Amino acid sequence: MAREDAVRCLRCLLYALNLLFWLMSACVLGVAAWIRDSLNTVLTLTAHTRLEEAAVLTYSPAVHPVIIAVCCFLIIVAMVGYCGTLRCNLLLLSWYFCSLLVIFCVELASAVWTYDEPSVQRSDMISLKSRMPNYGLQRYQWLTHTWNSFQTEFQCCGVIYFTDWLEMTEMEWPPDSCCSNQYPGCARHAHYHDLSDLHQEGCGPKIYSFIRGTKQLQALRFLGVSIGVAQILAMALTLTLLWALYYGRKSPELDSTLPPQDDSAPLRVTHGASAEASQSGCSRSNKGCSVLTAAQSGLQFEMERLS
């Protein structure tokens, strides 16, 4: 009975862990896709600079194809673990344990291999100005779109200040993507009437903060550590469940190999014990012995009358 309760408890815990694997893997894939979009924009603006290398070093562990593939495979493994736990199948549970062990080793090796502290300084932000003269050119429409997207998303303008557009290009006013309330010609109106309608912070500090790490990156790191801890716990529970199921199936086989017991032996022991108890009772008290004798005589008489 205790073994059945332990198996039931182990199965419930594995159900919960597999559900966590599904949820956390889906969250990792979603956050990684969200970060990849912003990362592509930053890599376009920082191409051929030290900032590009720093951004790759910071975010490669989070959006590395190996990590994405591992999360997709973990969803499949969790489904197999759920089926194995539901049916108490030793083969499925063994495959589940081996798969978790391989995934954990791959994640650990990938984290160690891709970990590196980026070396970037604020003075490196000045190199972004070299990408500004190509803004608006027909050949660099992709760069123009990237600048507009980044300035709109991060609410910034220029590299250090919006006047960088006037210094590095032949433009008379900043792009419309610098406006806090965008509409055609908003930057020209703000330049001549109200500069407060333009984003006052440059994009250089925004890129620097992005490379140093964002909240999304911290969330991914937390999810990665949580998945690793959950995998260790799931492997330990799976081993315990395999042990309980294996010896639970082996115990009935051992019981069936034992020789059958003689049914007459307990009866003889019981009758002997009763006789000894009767004799000891009679030796202790003559009154108790007479009562017992009278009861036995009455019982024998009743049986003869009924027969």
Image (cartoon, rainbow, N blue to C red):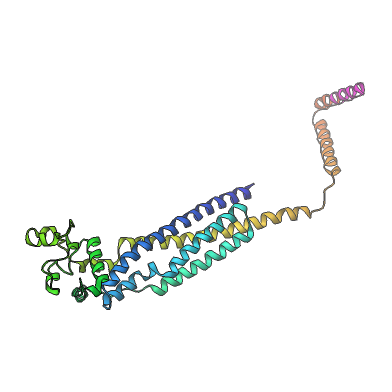
Farthest-out residue, front: 138
- In the picture, residue 297 is in which quadrant? top right
Q: Does the magenta segment cover residue 206?
A: no
User: Which of the two residues, 43 or 225, is positioned nearer the viewer here?
Assistant: 43
Q: Is residue 11 above or below residue 104?
A: above
User: Which of the two residues, 144 or 3, is positioned nearer the viewer here?
Assistant: 144
Boundaries of the magenta span: 294-307
Q: Position of residue 56 (x, y in %)?
A: 33, 73
Which residue sits at x=23%, y=67%?
147
Q: Does the magenta segment cover residue 295?
A: yes
Q: On the rendered structure, is 94 left or right of 68?
A: right
- In the picture, residue 210 is in which quadrant? bottom left
User: Which of the two residues, 150 or 242, is positioned nearer the viewer here?
Assistant: 150
Q: In which quadrant of the rendered image does the C terminus lie? A: top right
Main secondary-structure element of the magenta-colored stretch: helix
- In the picture, residue 99 is in which quadrant? bottom right
